[in-house]
Amino acid sequence: MSENNQKNTQQENPEQNVGRLRQVRRDKLAELQAQGKDPFVIVKYDQTHHTKEIRERAEELETILEVGEDGRTITPEWDTIPADKIVSIAGRMMSKRVMGKASFCNLQDRDGRMQIYVSRNDLGEEAYADFKKMDIGDIIGVKGFVFKTKTGELSVHAKELTLLSKSLMPLPEKFHGLTDTEIRYRQRYVDLIMNEDVKETFKKRSAILREIRNFLAGRDFMEVETPMLVENAGGAAARPFITHYNALDEDRKLRISLELYLKRLLVGGLERVYEIGRVFRNEGTDPRHNPEFTLMELYQAYTDYEGMMELTESMFRYLAEKVCGTTQIPYGDHIIDLGKPFERLTMNDAIKKYTGVDFDAVKSDEEAKAIADEHHVEYEDRHTKGDIINLFFEEFCEEKLIQPTFIMDHPIAISPLTKKKPTDPEKVERFELFINTWEMCNAYSELNDPIDQRERFAAQDANAAAGDEEAEHTDEDFLNALEIGMPPTGGIGYGIDRLCMLLTNSPSIRDVLLWPALKSQDK
């Protein structure tokens, strides 16, 4: 039974029919192998063009077909076509229409689709019969010339057609595509085949990373790599993943941040460094969080958090123009304006703006907790005024921050690696950029006082002893590096996945990760 004759059966009994169709394809493969035409022995194909290039160079590549006295087009002889007009393209067959002695199929490569005209007169009886047995999903190579059909569609007239790989599993039914979200994430390879917008999202993600590197190269930054398996997972408040290093018979942690090793490089005299890399945080998943995600951190000697604000605003504007072609970025129901100056608010001013509470006038932890009780903000006994300020901001302010806004001057209690503000020792020189209610990056005037740093690590150790699984721990080697001497430094960390969500108008972080975290299928 052929696949074409099973369309109705497939619609009525999809699970049962998939197994039958797989067997049909295996039988076709066995027949090809018996005839000495095994596609899997082919090791290469001379691909000279892609579909996008053919469309862009259509005027140059097109062969104009002559029309005979009877009104029919005359196919030119192969040896009369100039060599520079012959194209070889390769890709997946996405549709096929067999019409006696001549047929059409659609080939999809990395750039898009192209109609292929296939005739028995050009291929010969045997090759044309082989083509008719090919299935949707097969990977083929086509050598021929470019022309326009009577309807004006740019096409490739096949002079040679080669089966390069046999698809043994049917693709999803073409009219409905692949829509099951769970299957899309698990079988991203099928998602990329069936959904062109998904492929474009990941092309744009690649462009974003490329342009980030271009931007930073223009500012004389050096890209580096630091360890993923570490003894002390520091630089952020997060619970790490733990693994065992067999050769050393020691436990190691997967890094939760890039910070502490990059700062060691500034001690070593590398004044502008950055890393784009995976970090791992043992936490749940939601539309903005994945336990394995891409972080970029950069550090610049002899500047502060004001310098990081300028760099960030300039880089976001640059990326929008380069990748999207505009600084007016559509996201959901909003147009995010990356072209105008970003708003700047202290955390306390933001709270005052949206709740009327002025934490600058609050003098004690007890007073802060009383205000939290009045506003039904939950907190823990160990929390200080600084912790409660942060809880207030998360509860009442984040959801209001749609347009780009720098939130500055955080409480010292939630910023263990940041320099104090000279004018207010309860605050630190830190900012977070919020866009569309999301934290997009986190930046500091970096703490380079080893004595102050040791005291803050001690406070974090106390929090850990009290049961805080996300608290940092004292890192003696990092303290030793600071004692060698680190220059005044501005530093920042960017969530690359959220940036990709913003610039691709993607509603979930899973839509910009090729393989997001999912439960095992058997669970």
Image: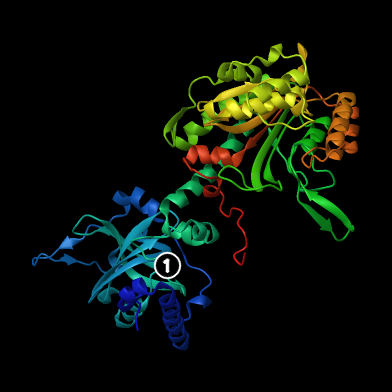
Q: Which quarter of the figure is the N terminus placed in?
A: bottom left
Quarter where residue 304 is shown: top right
Question: Horizontal and vertical percent for residue 148?
Answer: 24, 57
Query: Is residue 431 in view from this perspective?
Result: no
Query: Is residue 408 in view from this perspective?
Result: yes
Judging depth in this view, the residue of 292 and 357 nearest the camera is 357
Question: Horizontal and vertical percent for residue 88?
Answer: 40, 63
Question: Horizontal and vertical percent for residue 41?
Answer: 52, 77
**Residue 133 vertical placement versus 253 (above, below):** below
Left or right, 304 with reference to 316: right
Judging depth in this view, the residue of 244 and 27 nearest the camera is 244
Judging depth in this view, the residue of 176 and 210 nearest the camera is 176
Circle 1 residues within 10 Å: few <14, some 14–19, many ≥20: some
The residue drawn where x is 41% and y is 81% is: 24
Judging depth in this view, the residue of 266 and 398 nearest the camera is 398
Q: Which quarter of the figure is the C terminus placed in?
A: bottom right
Count of numbered labels shown in the rendering: 1
Question: Horizontal and vertical percent for residue 199?
Answer: 46, 52
The residue drawn where x is 52% and y is 61% is: 187
In this view, which residue lies farthest toward the bottom? Answer: 34
**Residue 217 vertical placement versus 514 (above, below):** above
Q: Identify the residue under disc 1.
A: 171
* Kind of residue at badge 1: Leu
Left or right, 372 with reference to 21: right
